[in-house]
Image: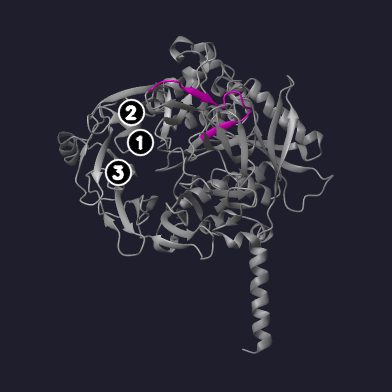
């Protein structure tokens, strides 16, 4: 073949490829679901005792060529100054996660499911090199661990085993489930770090969720609950201190959440506290500090118009470093234990989630943190404190992102019908032209006690970047009930789901139209979990949306109350009492009760194994819509829970959502 023939053939192939997939070609410079197969994420940074190295976790996308369906995690290290490239340190075909340095800096301990039974166990590996050593070999999984201050022991939380009698019955096929009678408690074990010998120090009928050692190594602070159910862990946990030598135990606080963090001087313990109100039963969280003896509990952050979590002590025991959600801006801040003053430290633009998003060096001079932006997934950054403190990006896990032309997020505000100021994030498609009106999608977050943030939104759960790349204007409102705006705002949807919060979202839709962003005839709405609830609610209350996506949505509060894993406290907290004593209130706030009013074409998507929002919620709404003649589709994803983990399901989910909005908002 001549050179001209080769050039002609190549050109023809490229032309046919472009003609055959115009949407992929037009979006090639932006971001698509196929990029999920390349996207790496980082989390759980841990600083070495001398402050010179950082261990962290890298979540790798699955290798589909090898038949992998789910992501895999490895442990990497990088020096704090960034003089050497980050590199894998503990890795295998299995998952490695939760890295923690030994107090002398000679070892990194971590959890891995690399054993033959696939249940995570505790390992340790020398920093100088060598193979990882298996420390524990329990029949069931290790949930978490921490080193003792002298490095000679581990405090390890282990899931209790299935009773032998039950296991034998299941092996022969007698696998019935007796609800509320087969609890698997997390027990605390103290394990020798050298010999791996150990013993359980908590009873079989107490569920230990998280733990921290006292600086002198004689006691542990624990967040515990009487049962290992989600309802008990979320809403009915307490802080206890256990002397591991004498066995003496003391309850310091009820309404506690973890993890507990012991102050360097040994005098106090910081934790998360669920704030009560005499009339409004919604319980936002604040940071609490209590003396190790159980006196003088101080509640921090309740008077600020923001939300806090993940406290870590500075060496002087007078201040905490916290992750603060100040509106849509995630940032690190110093929180004074003595006077409740807040000093913002570094804007990190990450969502208000997880505990392991930053770490502080033992001398308090250095911080490592996840940090991202609207155009970049979070990487690991180092920050030195002080006027001359340097900031360095220690990892660059997704360099190919720089090749993309991505939309940027911007903060927007508007007034709701009652004058309340509402904030959100707006994404405009690349090449947006002022004066043109675009199809738009309003995305509602879950929770409701959660919030959208100014940062990366390109995952199976955050569709905003992908929608903007396909030419949509996307609005992310934080209606009343959201975090990030103080405890009063978080309580503001009490006994009012679908009331003021719905108005906040609808006035945000007005904002898009009034400011020339959106075509009023081509606006859609969608969301996941509570966002799915709000979507189902709005399409039964108004005709203004041309398309909707209900993801894992609560559509019938009455049946949801009886089937979710967080019953009874979750809805009881928002609606004053259980459903069976207030049936009218529950039904009057349920979309299914008004399905005959619906006019909006609605896609319903759900995980088949979802215990948080059981899949029956999807069937109820889908069948209701069909029976009243509304265009609808229901897609159920096997093996998926409330969060999706299989890559092909993630890709199909988001592609299907985008296609639905394109069908009804563009065609």
Q: Is residue 600 above or below residue 150?
A: above
Position of 22 compared to 176: left or right?
A: right
The quadrant in which the N terminus is found is bottom right
Residue 221 is situated, as x and y percent measured from the top left of the image, at: 35, 32
Residue neighbourhood size for the residue with mark 2, other residues' Cα within 10 Å, grouped as few (<14), some (14–19), many (≥20): many
Q: Is residue 1 above or below residue 643?
A: below
Residue situated in front as seen by the camera: 549 or 444: 444
Residue behind mark 2: 241
Position of 137 compared to 388: left or right?
A: left
Residue behind mark 3: 142
Residue neighbourhood size for the residue with mark 3, other residues' Cα within 10 Å, grouped as few (<14), some (14–19), many (≥20): many
Residue occupying the point 32% across, 51% down? 113
Asked whether the beta carbons under mark 2 and mark 1 sit within 8 Å of each other, the answer is yes
Q: Which residues are magenta?
A: 294-309
Residue 619 is one of the magenta-drawn residues:
no
Residue situated in front as seen by the camera: 399 or 626: 399
Q: Main secondary structure of the magenta part?
A: loop
Image depth: mark 3 or mark 1 in front:
1
Residue 653 is situated, as x and y percent measured from the top left of the image, at: 53, 46
Residue occupying the point 49% across, 11% down? 582
């Amino acid at each position: 073949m001549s050179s001209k023939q080769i050039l002609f053939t190549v050109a023809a192939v490229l032309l046919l490829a472009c003609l055959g997939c115009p949407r992929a070609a037009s979006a090639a410079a932006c971001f698509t679901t196929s990029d999920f197969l390349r996207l790496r994420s980082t989390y759980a940074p841990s600083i070495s005792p001398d402050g010179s190295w950082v261990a962290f976790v890298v979540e790798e996308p699955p290798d589909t060529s090898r038949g992998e369906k789910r992501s895999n995690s490895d442990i990497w290290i990088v020096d704090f100054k960034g003089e050497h490239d980050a590199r894998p340190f503990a890795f295998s075909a299995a998952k490695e996660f939760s890295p923690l340095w030994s107090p002398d800096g000679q070892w990194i301990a971590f959890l891995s499911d690399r054993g033959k039974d696939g249940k995570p166990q505790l390992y340790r590996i020398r920093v100088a090199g060598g193979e990882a050593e298996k420390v524990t070999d329990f029949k069931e999984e290790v949930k978490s661990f921490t080193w003792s201050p002298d490095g000679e022991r581990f405090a390890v939380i282990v899931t209790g085993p299935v009773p032998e009698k039950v296991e034998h019955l299941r092996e022969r096929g007698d696998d019935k489930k007796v609800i509320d009678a087969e609890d698997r408690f997390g027990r605390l074990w103290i394990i020798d770090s050298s010999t791996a010998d150990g013993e359980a120090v908590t009873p079989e009928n107490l569920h230990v969720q998280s733990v921290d050692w006292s600086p002198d190594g004689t006691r542990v602070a624990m967040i515990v609950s009487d049962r290992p159910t989600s309802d008990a862990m979320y809403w009915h946990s307490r802080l206890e201190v256990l002397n591991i030598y004498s066995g003496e135990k003391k309850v310091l606080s009820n309404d506690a959440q973890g993890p507990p963090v012991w102050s360097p001087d040994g005098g106090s313990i910081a934790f998360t506290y669920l704030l009560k109100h005499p009339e409004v039963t919604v319980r936002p969280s604040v940071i609490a500090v209590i003396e190790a003896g159980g006196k003088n509990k101080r509640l921090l952050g309740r008077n600020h118009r923001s939300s806090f979590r993940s406290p870590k002590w500075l060496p002087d025991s007078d201040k905490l470093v916290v992750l603060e959600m100040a509106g849509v801006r995630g940032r690190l801040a110093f929180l004074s234990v003595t006077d409740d003053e807040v000093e913002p430290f570094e804007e990190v633009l990450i969502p208000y989630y997880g505990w392991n998003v930053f770490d502080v060096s033992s001398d308090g001079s250095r911080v490592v943190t996840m940090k991202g932006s609207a155009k970049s997934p979070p990487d690991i950054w180092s920050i030195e404190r002080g006027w001359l403190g340097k900031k360095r990006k220690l990892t660059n896990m997704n360099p190919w992102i720089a090749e993309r032309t991505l939309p940027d997020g911007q903060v927007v505000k508007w007034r709701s019908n009652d004058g309340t100021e509402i904030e959100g994030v707006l994404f405009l498609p690349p090449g947006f032209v002022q004066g043109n009106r675009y199809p738009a999608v309003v995305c509602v977050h879950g929770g409701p006690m959660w919030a959208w943030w100014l940062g990366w939104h390109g995952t199976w759960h955050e569709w905003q970047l992908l929608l903007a790349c396909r030419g949509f204007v996307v609005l992310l409102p934080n209606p009343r009930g959201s975090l990030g705006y103080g405890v009063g705002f978080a309580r503001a949807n009490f006994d009012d789901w679908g009331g003021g919060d719905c108005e906040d979202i609808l006035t945000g839709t007005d904002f898009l139209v009034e400011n020339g962003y959106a075509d009023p005839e081509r606006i859609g709405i969608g969301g996941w979990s509570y966002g799915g609830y709000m979507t189902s609610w709005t399409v039964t209350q108004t005709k203004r949306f041309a398309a909707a996506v209900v993801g894992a949505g609560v559509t019938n509060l009455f049946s949801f109350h009886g089937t979710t894993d967080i019953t009874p406290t979750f809805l009881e907290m928002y609606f004053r009492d259980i459903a069976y004593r207030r049936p009218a209130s529950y039904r009057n706030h349920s979309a299914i009760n008004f399905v005959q009013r619906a006019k909006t074409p609605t896609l319903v998507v759900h995980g088949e194994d979802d215990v948080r929002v059981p899949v029956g919620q999807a069937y109820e709404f889908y069948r209701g819509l069909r029976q009243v003649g509304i265009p609808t589709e229901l897609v159920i994803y096997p093996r998926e829970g409330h969060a999706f983990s299989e890559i092909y399901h993630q890709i199909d989910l988001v592609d299907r959502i985008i296609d639905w909005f394109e069908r009804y908002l563009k065609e």
